[in-house]
Image: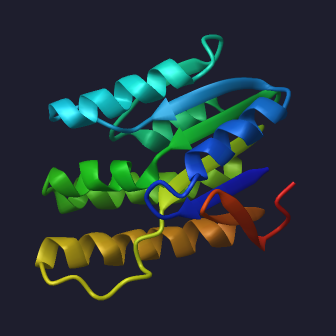
Amino acid sequence: MRTLILGGARSGKSALAERLARESGHEVVYIATGQAHDAEMAARIAHHRASRPAHWHCVEEPLALAEVLLAQARPGHCVLVDCLTLWLSNLLGLDDAARFARERAALLDVLPMLTGQVLLVSNEVGLGVVPMGELTRRFVDEAGRLHQSLASQCERVLFVAAGLPLAMKGSVA
């Protein structure tokens, strides 16, 4: 089953994804997309590493997400991607439209082929006002388009606020 988990910053979406991964009974592969470009982000990454169970396999991949998903997703595995908005930021930060288009298309193409359980975590950024800056508007637009495309391919879509999941498609459990 493919699950998209959306929510705002510190909404509890990662905690929910990790709980679902633990409860899956499968071997867990955690795909981390964050990059430590500053001390604060390095501390966040260190906190996430320390909080994950030691027996979970972790793959850190900031760009080639589809390739890693294809290599890791299989029956008996639960693959957790945290998070898609960091991945999107990484790609947009390259300022390479062709690479962005290839990686986005590859993710959408590979998703229906994945076996096992797949949990995709992403920040919902479209609930506020239209941002002032061009790059920020592009990020919000691309995140919204990506979420819509992923939601159409996932069997379950959950929205998390204040640590409480709301099923938008499928069921919470």
Residue 89: percent from left, percent from top: 27, 54
- Residue at 22%, 58% (x, y): give it: 92
- Residue at 57%, 63% (x, y): give it: 6
Q: In this view, does 108 lie to the left or right of 65?
A: right
Q: In which quarter of the image is the C terminus?
A: bottom right
Q: Is residue 88 left or right of residue 151?
A: left
Question: In the picture shown, does residue 107 fall above or below 126?
Answer: above
- Residue at 22%, 82% (x, y): give it: 131
Kindly tell me whether residue 126 is visible in this rendering: yes
Question: In the picture shown, does residue 148 fall above or below 71?
Answer: below
Residue 132: percent from left, percent from top: 15, 84
- Residue at 33%, 41% (x, y): give it: 63
Looking at this view, is 14 or 147 the one in front? 14
The quadrant holding residue 27 is top right
Q: Residue furthest front?
A: 162
Kindly tell me whether residue 110 is visible in this rendering: no
Q: Which residue lies furthest to the bottom in this view?
A: 129
